[in-house]
Image (spheres, rainbow, N blue to C red):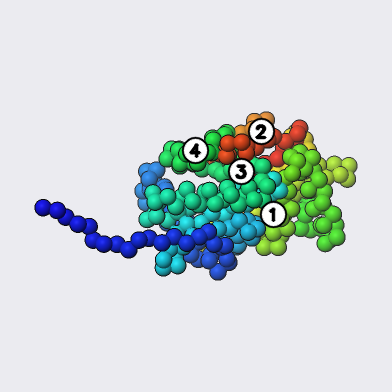
Amino acid sequence: MTTTSPWRPPRVLNGPMSARLTDIDALNRAFSDAFTERYRRDGMVGVRVPFLSPTIWRYAIEDADGGAMLWRDERDEIVAFNMAHHSGVEGWMGPLAVRPEWQGTGVGKSVVLAGVEWLRSRRARVIGLETMPRTMDNIGFYSSLGFVPGRLTITLTLDAASVDTPVPLLGALPPRERDEMLAHCLRITREQMPGYDFTRELILTLELGLGDAVLLRRAGELVGFALFHAAPLVEGRSREELRVLKMVLCDQLDVEVMADLLAGAARRAGTRRVAVRVQGEYLDVYRRLVARGARVRWTDLRMTLAGSGEGKAKGGVVLSNWEI
């Protein structure tokens, strides 16, 4: 006796297409479904990944600057997406996800390779992403596409300042001075990491009201800055954490001074703590923050495409968060 499976129409995948602001609700559902399933596979049954704030999605789409891609099925529903970003020659992907029912069909490979191709078209010299270090199948999947594991990125948190202190902020400057300061931020960034450029992230953060940038001056000269978001990451949540997305210091010894300024900014923004993601290349920064009382909260594994790895700042520090 033979049996037959019921006939099913072939699945149609269309993309990549450009993500639009009108796609945010559908992106949120795809994001939540995919990462909830990821946690379930890692043994965290019952965890439901919440929706991100629509303003955070807007930042991700606009910061991608044309690299926000999505794929749709025959019913025009989003089944996968990849937010590919470039900050000058630094390119990275995130968030990216495939809906659970489409995983294992080859869609994930198409999603990642499309991001790689787009970043190469933008002349990115660094091409990378981050994943959870305990998720072995993710690491194996990315490795099969030519990515190699690097060091951990460790998220550290510091308590907000207990008293109000003056904090010099980019957003507090008059428009002309702000434009001049953006040029100085670009200059010191490229002195430390040639080709890197965080200008778009700085401007977009201010335009969307997500946060600001702390400025560190010495003898009237800019010697460091830290771009942060204080707006809630999760939809409907109150402000809890000031998240540092980018930090540039001409001298790594200034990390403690910057930490104090960020703690002050956290208090002024109404958050309880500062979160700094330290790449493993900067062990002295990590040690200094821990000595100051920072607590380890999370780890991610940095992976880069073979031949497109990261460098290290020339005597200073360049921390670049590869998540939104």
Task: Name the residue type under label 1.
Answer: Glu
Say which of marks 4 and 2 sits in front.
Answer: 4
> x, y (%) of residue 304?
58, 39
Residue at 47% of width from left, 62% of height from top? 14
Q: Amino acid at mark 4?
A: Ser
Sequence-earlier tag: 3 or 1: 3
**Callouts 1 and 4 close, C-beta under 8 Å:** no
Q: Secondary structure at mark 2?
A: loop
Using the image as rendered, state which of residue 159 and residue 14 is in the foreground.
Answer: 14
x and y, in percent, of residue 240 in the image? 58, 53
Q: Is residue 75 above or below residue 100?
A: below
Q: Nearer the viewer, mark 3 or mark 1?
A: 3
**Residue drawn 77% across and 35% down?**
251
Pointer 4 local density, CA inside 10 Å: few below 14, some 14–19, many at least 20: some
Q: Amino acid at mark 3?
A: Ile
Give x and y (percent) for residue 24: 53, 64
Instruction: From the image, tell me which residue sits under label 4.
Output: 143
Q: Residue furthest left?
A: 1
Question: Is residue 26 shown left or right of residue 197?
Answer: left
Is 123 drawn above or below residue 31 in the view shown? above
* Residue 201 numbered mark, or none: 1
Cα distance in 3D space between marks 4 and 2? 24 Å
Please provide percent x and percent y for residue 96.
52, 52
The kind of secondary structure element at disc 3 is strand
Q: Earlier in the sequence, mark 2 or mark 3?
A: 3
- Mark 3 packing: few (<14 Cα in 10 Å), some, or many (20+)? many
Of marks 4 and 3, which one's residue comes earlier in the chain?
3
What residue is at 58 percent from the left and 66 percent from the top?
21
Look at mark 2 in the image and give the residue it sits on.
Answer: 282
Q: Are there few (<14), some (14-19), or many (20+) residues within 10 Å of tag 1?
A: many
For disc 3, the marked residue is: 127
Q: Secondary structure at mark 4?
A: helix
